[in-house]
Amino acid sequence: MENLPELLVANWNNYPRINARLWEFRTENQAVKLLDSLSRCIPRGLGRSYGDCSLEKNIISTPDFKRFIALDQKQEILECEAGISLDQILRTIIPRGLFLPVTPGTRHVTLGGAIASDVHGKNHHLHGAFGRHVLSLLLLTPGGEVIDCSREKNAEIFYAVCGGMGLLGLILSARIRLMPIQSTYISQLTIPAENLDHLMDLFETHEQSTYSVAWLDLLSRGRNFGHGLFMLGEHCLSGEITSKDLRRREKFGINIPFFMPGWIMNEHGLRAFNNLYHLRGKSGPGRSFPDLDDFFYPLDKVHNWNRFYGRKGFLQYQFVLPKEHSRLGLEKIQAHIQASGILPFLAVLKLLGPQAGPLSFPLQGYTLALDFPIKPGLSAMLSALDRLVHNLGGRIYLAKDARMSKLDFRRGYPEISRFLELKNKLDPKNKMASLQSKRLGLCAKPY
């Protein structure tokens, strides 16, 4: 095996950063040989997770493994190698009147990464996470065996791989179910919410809407505590918008060419950002027709937007609370954040449906994603927030985690024993390991 140089590697939030070797492959045979040659490794796609779940001294980089295998347009089924990006998939299927039934907030993740993180979108309350729409997958186990997994065949492995953070093996390919669309446009309704109660009432009232998401102003206090904008959407039908079709319009985004000074991400900048959002809701409820990119992937238009947070990076803290504890719980959490004086630059609220696999993040309830610039006091504040989340029966998203304790992890994911039994069976030598898995005790046996 060649002696690769070490590179400084970080995921999207630029924290933590480690020296690692990136190993690439282009064929299944190369993948088998590569996995056999490494004693400890973790798969990594395009690096869009926010923590250390895909960081290790040896990283198997998958984006060169990206062939389309088959597209059955009539049956709406696509089969691809796992290193292909959602962007590549969408460029192929949208002109054919097809779309992903579940998509995260960026096109720039791999198919394998979407499965391993069991990503969710604005429609989880109705359509579940990404793994729900995976029909089958091929898994290269740490022992070198290729296993065909589905809900009917090797079902226990299948459910554990969806959300399993790459710890059971290397996903080689997958067959996924697509959905038909008639237009590249979304009919979006934006409703200003007076406070957190009003916002959650809107989620409940529009629970049968396909897509829903809300932005919160965490600077608001008093009777406006938790106010924001609620947005819901449906795919436009053919002819609903005159002269609109299935062609994707290429857009010229802006690029952040370098890391910004850390002082930019302060309360003044946050207030300016919030004011821009408020302008969208000042005239009351409004109907608009954004295209798919603007509705699902607004941040993709700002290339390297993570550099806004400076070289120190940021932490995205995403948690979910059970529905019965969400109203009171979110009020407590928002009050805790305000009292700390450490405010997130972005706060996004979504409604989730039931859980799937043992490490899949969603619970039936509300999830809040918060972006915090790294600064003194943040770690202590988030540790206190961890305790509050778990006392309310919630959990933290593994794909966004860089600091959770082993105890808090086990409290949030009570089905971990099922996963560890399978891990011990498929990977007794702990070949598949990440910085996160070591920190959280996601190992077949202690190191």
Image: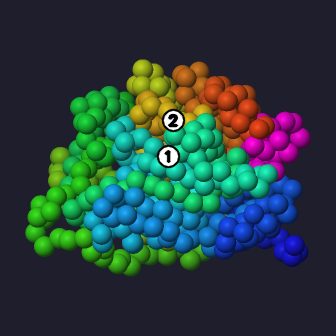
* In this picture, residue 290 sits left or right of residue 65: left
Looking at the picture, which amino acid does disc 2 mark? Ala
Residue 165, x across and y down, in percent: 65, 48
Q: Residue at x 17, y 46 (%)?
A: 284
Q: Residue at x 78, y 44 (%)?
A: 427
Which range is magenta?
426-447
Q: What is the distance, in whole Å, between disc 2 and disc 1 at their CAs?
A: 8 Å
Instruction: Please name whichever residue, 303 or 384, is drawn nearer the observer in this view of the structure.
Output: 303
Does residue 123 sit above or below 75 in this rendering? above
**Residue 2 visible, this angle:** yes
Does residue 401 sit above or below 10 in this rendering? above
Judging by the rendered image, the residue that carries numbered circle 2 is 356
Instruction: Please name whichever residue, 62 or 145, is drawn nearer the observer in this view of the structure.
Output: 145
Whether residues under marks 2 and 1 lie with C-beta atoms below 8 angstroms apart, the answer is yes
Residue 148, x across and y down, in percent: 60, 51
Label 1 environment density (alpha carbons within 10 Å; few <14, some 14–19, many ≥20): many
| Residue 301 figure quarter | bottom left
Which labelled disc corresponds to residue 131? 1
Does residue 439 sit above or below 115 in this rendering? above
